[in-house]
Image (cartoon, rainbow, N blue to C red):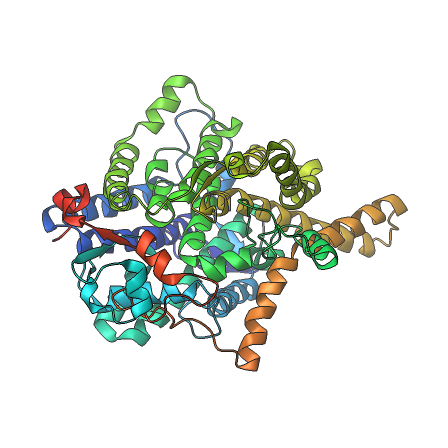
Amino acid sequence: MTARKKTASGIKIPFRLWYALATGFLVIPVIIFCLGYLRWYVGIPFALCFAGFSVYAVMDCTKQGGGKTTLESNTKDFVIPLKYLIGFGLFAIFLAYFSGVGEFIYSLQDHAIRRATLTDLVNYKWPVIYDYSTQTNPDVIKEIGKTSGKTALMYYFTYWMPAALAGKLFGRTAADVCLMLWTAVGIFLTLLGMAKLNGRASITQPMFFMFFGGLDVIPTLVHSATGYSLWTSIEGWVPNMAYYCNMSELANVYHQCVPCFLITVLVMLSVNTRTFGLTGGLLFAYSPFGVFGILPVIVTAVFRKEMRQDVKGTVKDLLTPVNIISALILLVMYGSFYTANSEAVGKNGFTWKYYDSAGLFIICYLCFLVIEVLPVTAILYKRYRKNVFYICAAICLTLIPLYMMTWVNDFAMRASMPSRLIMCIFLSELFKDLYDEDAERLRKQKKMGKKKAAGLVFTILITILMMFPGFVNAYLIAGSQMTGEPDRKDMVGSFGNVNCATDGVIEYAYVINNQFYTDDYLDTFFFRYLGKT
C-alpha cells in the first residue's frame, strides 16, 4: 500500500487505503461483539475469521472479476483538494455532534433509548442481563407486568460496541466522545466514497448527505390548510408508509444509517464480487431491515454490464470461502440473536392489509410515490436512466412501501436507505456538473436559452423544497438548543430501571418491553450454543 502523497492539486488517497479504513470501521465493532458476547471457543474463531477475511478483502479490492470488466477507474487513487479534505473532516464532526450523537447538544426523542443502550453496555457485564426486581417506577412495572425474573437485552447494538468498550476502560464521557468521533469517521469515509463516485470532491456531497429528502412540504402545506386527519408529522403524512430524510435518519438512527450508507458506497465501488458476503453481509450486524435494501443493490452490482462474466465465472467469484463463511457466520450469529425476541417485529405483512379500504390504500400509495419517489427520479432521469444503480434504486423505492414490519413500518424506513443514498449520490453529481457547466458558460460569455433556464430554475426549486424536512429537523435541533429547551435524553436512563414509562409521544416502557427484553433467553439458540451465560 502506497503512502498518502500530496500532489499539486491536493491529497492523493490510495483507493486501497480508503477501502481498508471503511472495512475496518465496519468490522471492528463486530469483532468486539464476538469477543465480548460469545463464548471464547466461538468468539475467538469468529473474530479471527472476520479479521482474516477483512485483510483478504482489502488486498483483493483492486483486482478485477474473473471476466473482462471496465471498472478500472473505480480502483484508481483519487485526489481530494486539501480544502475539501479538511472541510469534509470538520463537516463530519459537526454533523455527528449536531445530530445528537453522544448527546452533547439537544437531541431528538429516540436518543432516550439510544443513550440508555450505551449506558447499559458500559455499566453491565456482557451479555447484558436485567433483573426485573430493579425496576422502581410503578408505571413502568405496570406496563412490564413483572417484578421478578431475568431478561436479556436483545437489539442491534453492535454499532455502540467500540464506544461501550471505551466507556468500560475510561468512563462514560469517554464513551460519548468515542461514539461521536466514531460516527464522524463513518460520515467522513462515506463522503470520500461519494466524491470518488462523483469524480471529484464538491460542496454538493456534504450538502445532500445532510439534507436529502422528499417533497414532504406539499402534504405539510395541505395539512396546514385543511387539517386532514391522516397527517401525523412532516414525514408521517400517510398511514403505514414513510421515507425519512437523511437529517432525520442521522438524528434518530445513526447506528443504522451510517454503516448502511458506507456499505452502499463500498458495493457501488467494488470491482469484483469475491467479498460481497462480508462487505454486504456486515449490514446485518447494524440494520436487519437495511439488509432487504442492500440485497437488490448487490445483485445489481453483480450482474451489471461492467462486471458481467459467463455463468461459470460469476458463480466462481460468488462462491468464495469469504462470501460463504462470512455470510454464514453473520446469519447464524446475528440471526439467532435477533430472532430470540419474536415480539420485536410486531405488525407485519402487505401494507394494504392495514387500510380500511383498497381505494384508500391506492390513493395513499400513489400520493406517497408522487411526493417521495417521483421528484428525485424525474430530476435524474435524463442523465441516469441507463445507469443500473439508478434503475435499481427507482424500482426499490417504488416497491418497498408495499410491505411493512413493526407498527411504524421500520422496514420501509430502513430498507429504503441504500436506494435513497444512491439517489443522493447522483443528485450531488448532477448539481456539481450543473455548477461546472454554468461556470464554463459564464467564462465563455454564452447566454442560456430560455427553455433551458426555466428547466434549471424548476429543478433547483424542486430540489430546495426536497430539503425542507432536513431543514425543519435542523431548525428544531438548533432552535431548541439556543432556547434551552429540555430534551428527553435521560427519560429512560437504563433499561434495568426505566425512569419514565412515556413522554407523552413515545411509550418507552412498551417499546422496551417488546423490542429490547427477551425472557427465557437461556432457552434460545443463541444462548444455548453461542453466547456467554
Q: Disc count in the image?
A: 0
Q: Residue at x 83, y 45 (%)?
A: 452
* Any part of residue 270 in sight: no
Splitting the image into 4 quarters, where does residue 220 fall? bottom right
As rendered, which of 56 and 301 lies closer to the eye? 301
Q: Is residue 96 above or below residue 204?
A: below
Instruction: Using residue 228 as the reference point, say whether residue 8 is left or right of it.
Output: left
Q: Is residue 386 above or below residue 488?
A: above
Q: Residue at x 58, y 49 (%)?
A: 424
As rendered, which of 135 and 211 lies closer to the eye? 135
Splitting the image into 4 quarters, where does residue 442 fall? bottom right
Can you give x and y, in whole percent of width and height, for residue 203 in the image? Answer: 62, 60
Can you give x and y, in whole percent of width and height, for residue 353 in the image? Answer: 50, 35
Q: Residue at x 28, y 64 (%)?
A: 141
As rendered, which of 493 and 14 lies closer to the eye? 493
Can you give x and y, in whole percent of width and height, for residue 352 in the image? Answer: 54, 35
Q: Is residue 23 above or below residue 491?
A: above
